[in-house]
Image (cartoon, grey):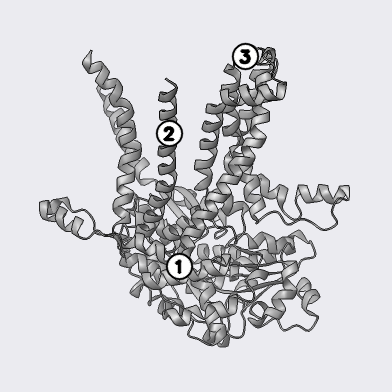
Amino acid sequence: MKTTVLSLTATLALTAAAVQAQEVRVYNWSDYIDEELLTQFEQETGIDLIYDVFDSNEVLETKMLAGGSGYDVVVPTGTFLQRQIQAGAFQPLDKSQLPNIDNMWDVVTDRTDVYDPGQEYAINYMWGTTGIGVNVDKVKEALGEDVAMNSWDLVFDPANMEKLASCGVHFLDAPAEMIPAALNYLGEDPDSHDPEVIARAMEVYEPIRGDIQKFHSSEYINALANGDICVAVGWSGDILQARDRAAEADNGVTVEYIIPKEGAQMWFDQMAIPVDAPNPEAAHTFLNFIMDAENMAAASNYVYYANGNKASQEYLNDDVIGDPAIYPDQETLDNLFTTTPYPPRVQRTVTRLWTEIKSGV
Amino acid sequence: MNLRRFALIAVPYIWLLALFLVPFLIVLKISLSDIALARPPYMPQLDLSAGWEGITSFFAALDFENFVFLTTDDLYWRAYLSSLQIAALSTFITLCIGYPIAYGMARAPLEWRATLLMLVILPFWTSFLIRVYAWMGILSNEGLLNQFLMWTGLISAPLTILNTNTAVYIGIVYTYLPFMILPIYAALEKMDESLLEAAEDLGCSRIQAFWLVTIPLSRNGIIAGCFLVFIPAIGEFVIPSLLGGSGTLMIGKVLWEEFFSNRDWPVASAVAIILLLILIIPIILFQRNEQKAREAEG
């Protein structure tokens, strides 16, 4: 009898400990992982993985600043990460629990050092560019066979937009990327924090805003793949996913991703652990799992985004590592720009300007 | 005896205190503070460990600059006005559709009423979000409605309804219709029909009897229905963001931008406080007026 009670208590204690340790809650961007990896993680580690998705940095940031989000791993973009680190939202990584960190690629870490020096709080998950996705046939139909599709003129020149409006143009609902793109087009510093320079973005958007059907940050993947729209300004991998879905559906839609010759924004999505994460140890296990060369390659092969993992490159499919839209050549890479976070007052100017661009008020 | 009476009176007050006054004061406090890069993103924080000094320095740092800021940009009053307009018109449309339905239900044979009531409540069994999404499928350019209209030959090119204010009205009226029907139905069902007979005996036509007897007797139902539709509609966020276009200006969206895009909790709170005042002051005045009218009637 006594032994039964003892073993029962022991089992209970074990179960309690197991329940506490065996769970990790990950909050990642939508359409951003091969879901088989999630199953694989659970099988390998025995940790329960709860996976939620979002589609805007703003939503994530509000959760981080409010605190008590309950998530163990989150994936903010570099600029947002930097501000959240300053606000004290993340805990420093324990590198001893992350042996795979040696796999990371210095080309990427050199650039992410601006946001988080020395990977103290975050590791790179994926990176990409903000460019233009086109439905090749429809755009040629609207603008003529020999239209030049390698320039921001395609969407920022009012004459083109007027003709494209009827077949549908979507823009990202992300002022922190769409305003730098317009400033870059005007020849200004895309990372300018000067309100007067930022206000010049209106010169680009005023003549074309009526021709933009929708500002949205995730709907365009399906809309582009189905042929509902003919142009989307969006994120590289999302547009390449649309290209893939259209090819799979064999619906006569050909989607292409373009990094315009004037340059485009390069951004980095970083995995970090909130300061109040309930399961920091499991979170480290997850990060280490993601940084495994083969796992990271599987994720990139699935979502068509480049990653910051040098060791993963030998496992990447040819249509990923060999595609200059995903892993740009040196010349294109030199043409890409990065931005830094806006201070609060400037942020207000940017949001207000964006509201005006979207609604006219 | 006294204790029991006290407890009875205290319950609604505690309810009001916990669920209205305390949250209101917290929001008011945030609206008087300043934006900061911290968790949570505003200053000052009330620091009770510093004792009396902490409290005084906390109050010294509060000011009304966020409310002043709201007057410097016409975005805010335009959004308030546009929300008021959308909510008022939607309430009116809902009333015009809901009253005949409620009337029909209340006049239906007794054995049908439970079924009809069930039919009104049935949509609530599906998630609100899914029902709004379904409207996106119905109203889009390639949607059911356009396909049907093109099939009948009434139109030759698809109507653009989705992502316009029309879609927002459709969404609000559809979503809130049961909230209008139910209280009116409750009022009409209780009505004594012999009053109508009496009115007709005294020389009223049926239409006169409807306006002079039925409408006044269902007045409380109409008022309750209008409040239940108007108040949530004015702060509606989900419907305009899913069905509305970039030109749809509603205070719910402005609030979202302040909170999420600007991370400016103090200004977002100030917007919320003003919205609350816009709603509460007319309601209090209305209630007081009603009270007086009732007292005058004796």
Instruction: State whether discs 3 and 1 lie on one chain.
Output: no
Q: Amino acid at mark 1?
A: Thr
Describe residue A88's horizontal placement relative to residue B141 as left or right.
Answer: left
Q: Position of residue A298 (x, y in %)?
A: 56, 63
Q: Is residue A4 visible?
A: no
Q: CA distance from mark 2 to mark 3?
A: 27 Å
Q: Is residue A172 above or below residue A150?
A: above
Q: CA distance from mark 3 to mark 1?
A: 69 Å
Residue at the spot x=41%, y=42% of the render? Answer: B280
Q: Residue furthest front?
A: B203
- Disc 2 residue crowd, few under 14, some 14–19, many 20+, Cα 10 Å: few
Instruction: State whether discs 1 and 2 lie on one chain.
Output: no
Q: Is residue B279 above or below residue B41?
A: above
Disc 1 target residue: A77
Q: Report the chain holding disc 1.
A: A
Identify the element where label 1 is drawn.
loop
Q: Position of residue A130 (x, y in %)?
A: 56, 73
Residue B289: image tag? 2
Instruction: State whether discs 2 and 3 lie on one chain.
Output: yes
Report which quarter residue A227 is drawn in.
bottom right
Describe residue A312's horizontal placement relative to residue A73 as left or right.
Answer: right
Q: Is residue A228 above or below residue A335?
A: above
